[in-house]
Amino acid sequence: MSDNLTDPAQSRVRTIADLARLAGVSAGTVSRALAGKSLVNEETRLRIQALASAHDFRPNQMASRLRTKRTGVIGVVVPLGHERRQHLSDPFFMTMLGHLADALTENGYDVMLSRIIPDADDWLEQIVNSGMMDGVLLIGQSDQFDVIERVARRYRPLVAWGSTMPDQIHCAVGSDNIAGGRLAGERLIARGAKRIAFLGDVRAPEIRQRYEGVAAAMAAAGLADGPLQLTTHLASDIMEQEIAQHLSAVGDRIDGIAAASDVIAMTAMRVLADRAIRVPDQIPVVGYDDLPLATQTVPRITTVRQEIAAGARAMVQALFARIAGQDAPGVVMPPLLIERDSA
């Protein structure tokens, strides 16, 4: 005859109470043992864990979360106020999301992903008031800076990827975009460019700062006119058409391109190639981000690197600190110029 304590076929363990009866201890002891609490001596803890494994017993996670008032879920939100046609399949989003998901799941959290078109002013309040998550990570600030600030005044477990402004309330992690734009401008000027076009939508704080950095580099070089700002959206279905229209309009009035992202840089190089304009011989191009695609184009893209993996880790660390009730300041990471073939 089999021993009920070790033969799963002879006993069905569905609850902590069932496991407690088998182990001859209280339900509280079982709960603490399965949680790895040091209040239970090691011998008893190992015996209870072995019983749980033998009977394929897993604690009710929902009940545990109700007791601790934690959901075990982190919301990852992509607000698209200025880029309503942009998709989650955008290479920057996918790269950042991958690093965030790795860091969160490695720490035992589930991820709830949302792509938000902020038609209502209270879109972020609806998310943080839902009770469905323990904290929120925003991939980008879009044109929603004021909304994020308002919510951050009362909701602390909130961290954004983006820019840090003077006296900013919400915690943000990102690169020094002005310095990055300056690096891009300086590289183009070193190549001999004097009439630089900036391709990007400056309504977003990060992109506006990149434009300002290019302008600062041109001013320092005595190029008084500054960059020609050509609004270019990140939505893949209109980007190429926009760039083609810009190039048709400006003709030979530009001799260098600073792109707000690597995707814009890649698309610009394709449009230039269609017009038999050589990169970098006739027009050098500098991107931004240093995504994996930057090494896969022909020519390879000279770009300004954001440390996306390190930034994602910093976001998660700051969020966990804030969930624990601690303070976590923003992080501004230095950018790095990566010189390749396009400039």
Image (spheres, rainbow, N blue to C red):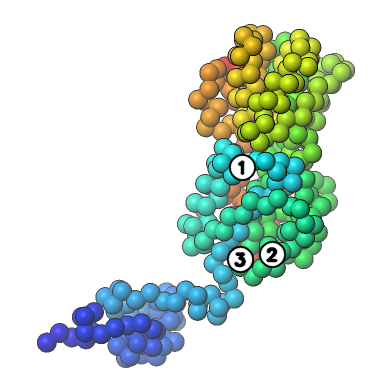
Asked if disc 3 and disc 2 are in contact, CB closer than 8 Å, the reply is no
Is residue 185 in view from this perspective?
no
Q: In the image, 56: left or right of 122? A: left
Give whichever of discs 3 and 2 has the lower sequence position.
Answer: 2
Residue at x-position 73% and y-position 21%: 245
Residue at mark 2:
128
Q: Is residue 36 above or below residue 217?
A: below
N-terminal-most mark, 1 or 2 = 1
In this rendering, is residue 249 above or below 329?
A: above
Which of label 1 and label 3 is nearer to you? 1
Q: Position of residue 26 (x, y in %)?
A: 39, 90
Residue 88 in sight: yes
Q: Position of residue 193 (x, y in %)?
A: 74, 13
In the image, what residue type sits under mark 2?
A: Val
Between 58 and 122, the residue placed more toward the observer is: 122
Give residue 133's mark.
3
- Which three-letter amino acid code belongs to the residue tagged 3? Met
Residue shown at 63%/18% (left/top)?
271
Q: Secondary structure at mark 1?
A: loop
Q: Nearer the viewer, residue 320 or 154?
A: 154
The residue located at (77%, 45%) in the rendering is 143
**Quadrant of the frame with the C terminus:** top right
- The residue labelled by disc 1 is 87
Q: Earlier in the sequence, mark 1 or mark 3?
A: 1
Residue at disc 2, secondary structure: helix
- Please state which amino acid type lies under the numbered disc 1: His
Residue 177, image quadrant: top right
Residue closest to the far right? 224
